[in-house]
Amino acid sequence: MKLLILLVIVLGVIAIAQLTKVYELTRSLRKTREEEISHADNKMNATLMLVWMFVFFFFTIVLYVKYQDYLPEAASEHGVAVDKLMNVNIWMITIMFFIVNGLLFWVSYKYYYRKDRKARFFVHDNRLEMLWTMVPGVTMAFVIVYGLITWNNMTGPAGKDAIQVEIYSRQFDWTARYPGSDKVFGSANVNLISTTNAMGMVSEGAISLEIHSIDSLIQEIETTLEANAVLSTLPESAVEVMKDQLYRHKRHKQRILDLKEFDLSGVSGWAAGADDNIVKGEFHIPKGIEVEFIFKSQDVIHSAFMPHFRAQMNAVPGVPTRFKMVPTISTTEMRQKLNDPEFNYVLYCNKVCGVTHFNMQIALVVDEPAEYAAWLAKQKTFGGVAVPATEPELTTPSDSLKKDTVQATALTIQDSKR
Amino acid sequence: MGEHAAMDHNHENGHDHGHHHHKESWISKYVFSQDHKMISRQFLITAIVMGVVAVVLSILFRLQLGWPGEKFEFLNMMLGDRWAKDGILDRNAYLALVTIHGTIMVFFVLTGGLSGTFANLLIPLQIGARDMASGFLNMLSYWAFFLSSVLMVSSLFLESGAASGGWTIYPPLSALPQAIPGSGAGMTVWLVSMVLFIASSLLAGLNYIVTIINLRTKGMSMTRLPLTIWALLVTAILGVLSFPVLVSCAVLLVMDRSFGTAFYLSDIYIATNNSTDPNAAVGALEATGGSPLLFQHLFWFLGHPEVYIVLLPALGISSEVIATNSRKPIFGYKAMVGSILAIGFLSFIVWGHHMYITGMNPFLGSVFVFTTLLIAIPSAVKAFNYITTLWQGNIRYTPAMLFSIGLVSTFVTGGLTGIVLADSALDVTVHDTYFVVAHFHIVMGLSAIFGMFAGIYHWFPKMFGRMMNTKLGYAHFWLTLVCGFGVFFPMHFIGMAGTPRRYYENSYIDMIQWTADLNPIISVFAIVGGAAQILFLFNFFHSIFYGQRAVQNPWGSNTLEWTTPVEHIHGNWPGAIPEVHRWAYDYSNPEHEEDFVPQNVPLKAGEHGH
């Protein structure tokens, strides 16, 4: 096999070399020079331009026809508007594609070199140039205005009654969180993430659990180091690594203590977490009701892509992002429309995020509002971890969000108060 | 050498460009040369080698995409058990290949290679200068480029693999080796290589600008400059203004990676350690308070002008080649210059269109929609002016001409899909899909590489004193054109169906399955297209040694480089530097018998120049 490939390559090179030699010999016999392009060559290339134009156009049309239903019908309100805009744009650029390429290849065919003719000395023409400045100008004005109207409609602030869903991402899965009956998301902090608290939800219980586990790690390392100070059994490099770990654990503990000390105003945010629903594997949203997604990431940038809804937004660590939409077709209805009982909406990652980026997805189900309520009621709440017995104060969602996401801001505010 | 002394007296700028080398050693002639023509050839050959590497990488990952899971014995033979166990490409290796393919193509082939080759060759020759303003800086520029090329390629052989977060190296992925092995040593080498590359690019750019502004021969006013020079000038200005921003972007990333800062990092928890360093920090990271979006703003502030740094020289080359081989003046010279300037200016205020869905304020997005779509106007002007130049011309089909016409087609075809991507509302559904891959490969990749091929075929006689084989050139063009569109055109449809780029395998997402039948077709085109480049390589290297000897002005061209002797000499012209009396586009001027009038021919009595 290897030999065969090698052989083919070697033979190929020899063949080219021989062909070139023959070609050059005939050239020198006819005493023509490379730069003198013969009439036959000019004509052949001109003809090929025309042939290529037809081939190119033919396959373009084939692809257009075969892939015209590139996505199923848009399943969201703004998606319908996006599709309309897309169709207008595609029509426009397709027409331009045929006109400009057609002109180019036709002109290339028509005006190939003939000895008896002289090219027209045509330097410039203000009217013509004005024409092809103005026409694209006016077209672009239309495209811009139409596009921006659609864009503004889809990116405005979500309505007061919108349901909020947090889409939490990490390598390589998605988790959905619902704010629960108080409609307020509980605070979360990366410093509290652990095997039992995957999103780092903040509560007194979570804090004391995490501090306890860090303390035991610190103690373990300190004991080893003390023993080693006497026995010196560990190599120097291992000691360095352990000292480094010790330092990290201590800093980690301090960050959690800071959280406790400074985030006084966050106590309500902590309590609000108790009734939050955390959902994995598949998540539901109601049909006909506005949903505002809040995207978060705990490690690298991911992108939540939901092509059925013409929706996409990056999930950026440290910067919560939002996207709102109104789903208009339930999963059941879509299954009927597509005649596919297995069909499911899907949210998948569209920003390279690591080795299994290509399989980072979560199923999404659009329910009728009643089904949705029933489904949500069955989901687990975060309340498993101990929650302080204080009465949760009601805050507006935006307030609590600001608090729990931008820890640094809270710290600065606290500092300036002192 | 008395001749040389005499010629320096005639140099109206009075500079001495060091043409008084009485003896040239092999090293000063071929290695550490300060002669712009030699440096140009060095850039070209380095870029060709880099291009071959990048094409081979792309064929390797196209094998995986075309036939996922298929066992290719020779892959194992080439890459070994580590990167292709049982002949199936490793997932990390796939990402590294994609990343390095992109990096090499964008920076090393189409920036360093294209600008480096043709700016060095054409600027002194076409403006009538003895050499670049600083031959020494020019030499440094090449060697920095060479070093950075070697580093970039060598990163493929690192134990932890080359950089693998995509050529845009977005942090935190690129900042955290724990997140992906390629962000370890591979990323470090990538960054060092890029800083060297940028140094090279800046040295070169400043040199180009100074040379064009100061060393034009008598009579060569700015409005008589050939369009190649205009394009190269604006390219150099874009590079000088935008590359420093990429340096700062890269330096901040180096700080985040190695010195514990947090310019781009915030609220990060690393669950598992994927790096080769067993002691890398996992858990909640100390570094916090930065923003990954800062990186993207800095990156694309270079990244978008970069697109035009790649494209403008190609457009400049094709303007020259199309005018020469249509035997017709370029239509609307002033509009062509104006649109180069407009594109150059606009390219600085559109970077945000790469960031519509990153969480950037939607209103800011609207501003970028507006500025981005404006670029369609000067681009349309250029396209129509090219077509009008061809119209009623007398087209001679040299291989260079074929590639230039191909360029106009790819520029138009790829440019049009840019209108969809520039529209933020539409970008939401096609962002980061194969639609984008199709768009930029056609408008930037194919156009720029076609421009580069056009330049090589056209100026080969100037560079090497011999001709390339025309018939092989034809075969090369037609195969490349068909395969180029064959690879990238179907990608539009895969992308619109929702297939993300940089996916190792598309079979995990059910909804995009139905477009999978296009992938093997694309891969076949890629392989045939790649193989077609062997024709070019053979033609190029064979012709350097055995090509037909060139005459002084083989294409009947007007520009000054064809008034120099075929054999290269220091200082370019043996006697006085020619004086310029007319613009570069007096082709088929009815007031003259010949169908071309070189720029150094004085105006006839009563003739008014352009």
Image: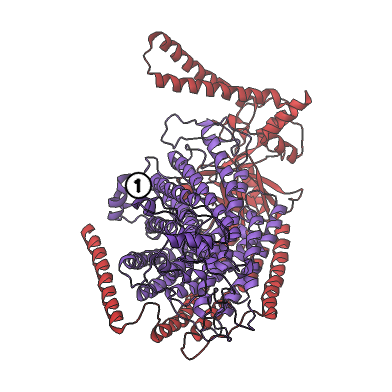
Q: Residues within 10 Å of mark 1 (few under 14, many from 20)?
A: some
Where does the image place residue B286, in percent across and percent down from the top left? 57, 29
B569 to the left or right of A383: left
- Kind of element beneath mark 1: helix
- Which chain is drawn using red? A
Vertical relation: B550 (above or below) B215: below
Chain assignment, label 1:
B
Camera-nearest residue between A26 and A82: A26
Camera-nearest residue between A67 and B238: B238
Which part of the image, by quadrant, shows the C terminus of chain B? bottom right
Q: Residue furthest right?
A: A417
Image point (54%, 18%), residue name: A215
A267 to the left or right of A296: right
Query: Is residue B441 among what the camera can see?
Result: no
A388 to the left or right of A361: right
Where does the image place residue A335, in percent across and percent down from the top left? 55, 61
Camera-nearest residue between A109 and B596: B596
Query: Is residue B567 among what the camera can see?
Result: yes
Tag 1 residue: B83
Query: The disc labelled 1 sits on which kind of residue?
Result: Trp
Image point (42%, 32%), residue name: B277
Where does the image place residue A223, in percent across and percent down from the top left? 46, 13
Vertical relation: B204 (above or below) B290: below
Query: Drawn colour of chain B?
Result: purple
